[in-house]
Image: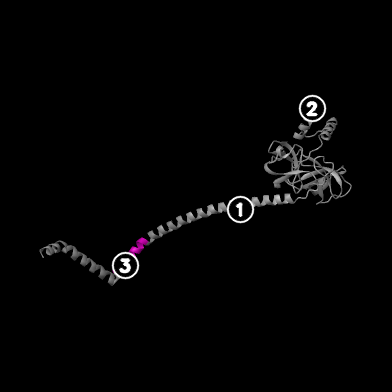
Amino acid sequence: MALAQQIWERTRDYVVFGTLLLIGVVIFVGRNGPALRAARAASLAVTAPVEGVFERAARFRQSLEENERLRMETADLSADVARLREAAAENAQLRALLQFEDTTTIRRVVGRVVAKDITEQSNLLTIDVGERDSVEIGMPVINERGIVGRVILTNDRYAVVMPHQNTQFRVPASIEELGREGVVRWDGASFDKLTMEYVVKTEPVERGMLVVTSPFSGVFPAGIPVGRVDTAYAAAGRNDYVIQLEPAAPISEVGYVYVLLTRPDPEQAILEAQARDSLGIERATSALDAQLEAATEE
């Protein structure tokens, strides 16, 4: 009994205080009077703006993270689309190349363009076939649309091609519908046009007429498309046309090619080169010319 009294004496103040506090809280909450409502309103007035700031900051941060995630996904998707388009373009070119019906019996090898050296005048292409694929200097290069150029340099694995859009390139050609012969070259001025010269003005040349390689080309088989007539005019005092052609195979669109495994007869080429030299006809020096001169010395 004495022990219980001692415990009560020590805890009495705390029990009384807790009981009174509990009674006060119950009365305060139960009444829900103006004082409580005012306190709640004041509390909301103080905390609401702060809570709004934190909430907006949280939303802003979340938006930034979401935007960054979407930006990265968009970049990845754009890269995927670009790769798919490139693959689709390559597949289309390969399908067209495989479906190309070559009327000649010349052996050929498929090459992929791995580099384009576009310098406005001395444009060159590099393809991924070379001497180990039987590719040699002087061989003609075409694709499913028409002539591309001729090989001017080789090593074991690669070859460099001088395309028709090079100021040193020349090819004898004829207007298919008229049978009129001329020479096609590139003047270095308009990248999407070739020039055909020395076509005798006997019959009208019309837009859209097909120009093909001549039987007298010496490099290309006859009948390979070179381009289509865009414009034709005769200079004052001259009896021949100057014709602008749209290339059949613009080098900007060339991805895969055929190298025709044939080359001009070396004896014929050497004889023609000597004839031009003896007549004082200026001609462009090329890798093929150097090779022919070396063969002459031997």
- Above or below, comparing residue 125 to residue 38 in the picture: above
Disc 2 versus disc 3: nearer the observer: 2
The residue carrying pointer 1 sits among few (fewer than 14), some (14 to 19) or many (20 or more) residues within 10 Å by Cα, namely: few
Name the residue beneath numbered marker 3: 38
Residue that extends furthest to the right in the rendered view of this protein: 202
Which label belongs to residue 46? none
Q: Residue at x 30, y 70 (%)?
A: 34
Give the Cα separation between the discs numbered 1 and 3.
62 Å
The percent coordinates of residue 252 (x first, y second) are 70, 46
Picture quadrant of residue 44: bottom left
| Residue 151 shows in this picture | yes
Q: Residue at x 19, y 65 (%)?
A: 15
The percent coordinates of residue 154 (x first, y second) are 71, 36
Tell me whether the residue at label 1 lies in contact with that at label 3, contact meaning CB atoms closer than 8 angstroms.
Answer: no
Which label belongs to residue 81? 1
Disc 1 versus disc 2: nearer the observer: 2
